[in-house]
Amino acid sequence: MVEQHTPRSLIVTFYGAYGRAFEGPVPVSALIRLLGAAGVDAPSVRSSVSRLKRRGFLLPERAADGSAAYVLSDEAQQLLDDGDRRIYGNPEPSDEWLVAVFSVPEQERSKRHLLRSRLARLGFGSVAPGVWIAPARLAEETAHTLERLRLTSYVELFRGAHLGFAPTAEAVARWWDLTALAKQHEEFLDRHEPALRALRSGPEPTPEEAYRGYLLALDSWRRLPYADPGLPRDLLPADWPGDRAAAVFAELHSRLWDRGTLFAQP
């Protein structure tokens, strides 16, 4: 997992962590201040906001004082709400699966590529050409994504149990690249476990330090619950690093998020 921390990624992460608590639109001046605390300069904030506006993630409005400001679009709000369940959720174990079967005409192969890439980004594993699988709890989020991208006419969704013939653990190891997923968890731990140890042994961080530390940790973490969709633990290797990575993020959240809100004020 290549560390992102691009200005655009950090803006999305900011809205997910703190921006939705603002009453009304977030002024551009506030974005510049709050992203500046994470090392992003003002020109980069402005250009990234413009790109997010073109993508339909942000909508321009005016703050109470008449200055330029932005709010989340309805689609962006839905995207972040779905993300909350991934990032902060603690799903109950289940042996139910969601299966997506799709067929796209050759003359619309760009949509076939879009379907494959979005299913992969949602955490689906590939069973066969046109057949993808994920834990069943992702059904609602998958439907939201397909509807948002206007791809529902190409896809059928099913849910049920795996009945054979290979043992399910063997099948999961074919459907997902577990080695690559484990490496992503290990890279997260390499970057953020030392910060957690420092928090445990050091003085309480200032609100700005807590805000910056949490924003960067969340920007790294929020991709992992998509790459690794929370596969049943008994189907994974015994030394699966995802357990420790999730515990590290949960403790960083408990130690930093609330204190960071003191800095992330309008």
Image: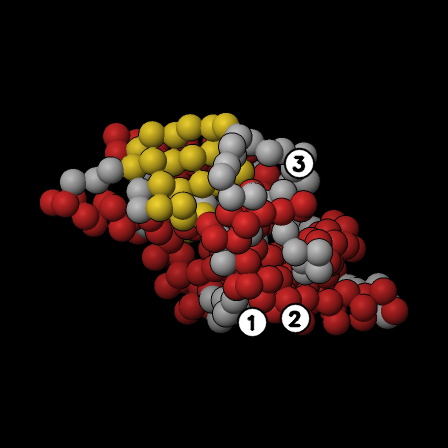
Q: Residue at x 41, y 69 (%)?
A: 43
Where does the image place residue 122, in percent across and percent down from the top left? Answer: 45, 46
Where does the image place residue 229, in percent across and percent down from the top left? Answer: 55, 46
- Disc on res. 39: 1
Write down the residue under mark 2: 191
Kindly report the distance in space between the C-alpha atoms of the residues bearing marks 3 and 1.
39 Å
Amino acid type shown at disc 2: Arg
Left or right: 56 with respect to 18? left
Question: How did the renderer colour the structure?
Answer: secondary structure
Kindly report the distance in space between the C-alpha atoms of the residues bearing marks 1 and 2.
17 Å
Identify whether 83 is placed above or below 5.
Answer: above
Q: Residues within 10 Å of mark 3 (few under 14, many from 20)?
A: few
Write down the residue under mark 3: 93
Q: Quadrant of residue 106?
A: top left
Query: Which structural element holds mark 1?
Result: loop
Q: Nearer the viewer, mark 1 or mark 2?
A: 2
Q: Nearer the viewer, mark 2 or mark 3?
A: 3
Residue 60 is at least partly visible in this image: no
Mark found first going from the N terminus, 2 or 3:
3
Dots 2, 3 in contact, CB < 8 A: no
Q: Quadrant of residue 56?
A: top left
Mark found first going from the N terminus, 1 or 2:
1
Amino acid type shown at disc 1: Gly
Where does the image place residue 77, in percent across and percent down from the top left? Answer: 47, 38
Left or right: 41 with respect to 112? right
Amino acid type shown at disc 3: Pro
Q: Residues within 10 Å of mark 2 (few under 14, many from 20)?
A: few
Q: Residue at x 47, y 65 (%)?
A: 7
